Image (tube, rainbow, N blue to C red):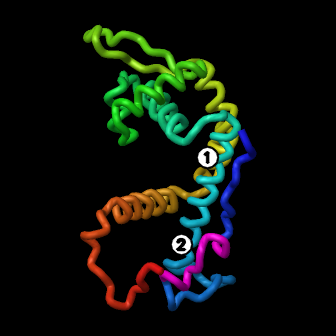
């Protein structure tokens, strides 16, 4: 697999803030953070997250769908929730045919094990193998430890503020575009 192309995390390479926020000053210096500074930090984090996942996919020689599927399988196992092909299709938003191909790839690579469902022998329960768990820990474990360490540096009120903000941001991003009121002064897409 060719080396992964990793996007830059610098705001200057991610697009101009002035496009979306024409009144925003470039850089905060020593001044108090503004809402635009917060969104710049979110953009920088998102670019770093994408870069980390690209490196993980490259290191594990997997595509994005396979890596996301493994993440969901491992999370379901941690919650002791059985997950089957239909559940995975719904979570990933892909067809049953695409899910069947994905599961075949994961099984052939030694990262997935299928078992009969305990109460419905026609159904299957999917499990990430020890290899998949070990690869995931080896590839992403150190990064997750660094992220946890960064979060632990925050005070309890700061942690609550970050959680509240990210929950609100997630809600704002989940809202369908057509329900957002158009802003007459907002720039239009090029």
Residue 53, label in figure = 1
Q: Position of residue 118 (x, y in %)?
A: 31, 9
Q: Does 75 lie within the magenta span?
A: no
Which residue was labeled with disc 2? Answer: 38
What is the magenta range? Answer: 11-20
Q: Position of residue 20 (x, y in %)?
A: 48, 81
- Compare residues 126 and 64 and report the one nearer the observer: 64
Judge whether 23 appears above or below 160 on screen. Answer: below
CB under 8 Å between discs 2 and 1: no
Q: Is label 1 in a helix, a strand or a loop?
A: helix
Number of on-image labels: 2
Residue 118, label in figure = none
Q: Does 13 lie within the magenta span?
A: yes
Judge whether 72 appears above or below 51 on screen. Answer: above
Measure the alpha-carbon separation of dots 2 and 1: 23 Å
Predominant SS along the magenta part = helix
Judge whether 181 appears above or below 138 on screen. Answer: below
Q: Which quadrant of the view contains residue 13? A: bottom right
Judge whether 113 appears above or below 88 on screen. Answer: above
Which quadrant is home to the N terminus?
A: top right
User: Is 101 on the left-hand or right-hand side of 18?
Assistant: left
Q: Residue at x 56, y 76 (%)?
A: 37
Q: Residue at x 70, y 37 (%)?
A: 59
Q: Position of residue 135 (x, y in %)?
A: 65, 28
User: Is 114 on the left-hand or right-hand side of 106?
Assistant: left
Q: Which quadrant of the view contains residue 114? A: top left
Q: Is label 2 in a helix, a strand or a loop?
A: helix
Q: Position of residue 122 (x, y in %)?
A: 28, 11
């Amino acid at each position: 697999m060719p080396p992964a192309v990793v996007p830059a995390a610098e705001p200057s390479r991610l697009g101009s803030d002035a496009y979306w926020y024409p009144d925003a000053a470039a850089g905060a210096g020593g001044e108090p953070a503004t809402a635009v500074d917060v969104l710049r930090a979110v953009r920088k984090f998102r670019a770093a997250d994408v870069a980390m996942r690209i490196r993980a996919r490259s290191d594990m020689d997997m595509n994005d769908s396979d890596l996301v599927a493994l993440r969901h399988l491992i999370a379901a196992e941690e919650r002791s929730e059985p997950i089957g092909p239909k559940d995975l299709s719904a979570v990933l938003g892909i067809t049953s045919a695409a899910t069947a191909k994905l599961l075949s790839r994961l099984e052939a690579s030694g990262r997935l094990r299928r078992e009969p469902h305990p109460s419905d022998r026609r159904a299957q329960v999917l499990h990430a193998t020890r290899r998949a768990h070990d690869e995931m820990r080896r590839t992403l474990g150190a990064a997750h430890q660094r992220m946890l360490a960064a979060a632990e540096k925050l005070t309890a009120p700061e942690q609550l503020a970050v959680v509240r903000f990210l929950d609100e941001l997630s809600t704002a991003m989940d809202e369908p575009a057509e329900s957002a009121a158009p802003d007459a002064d907002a720039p239009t897409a090029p």
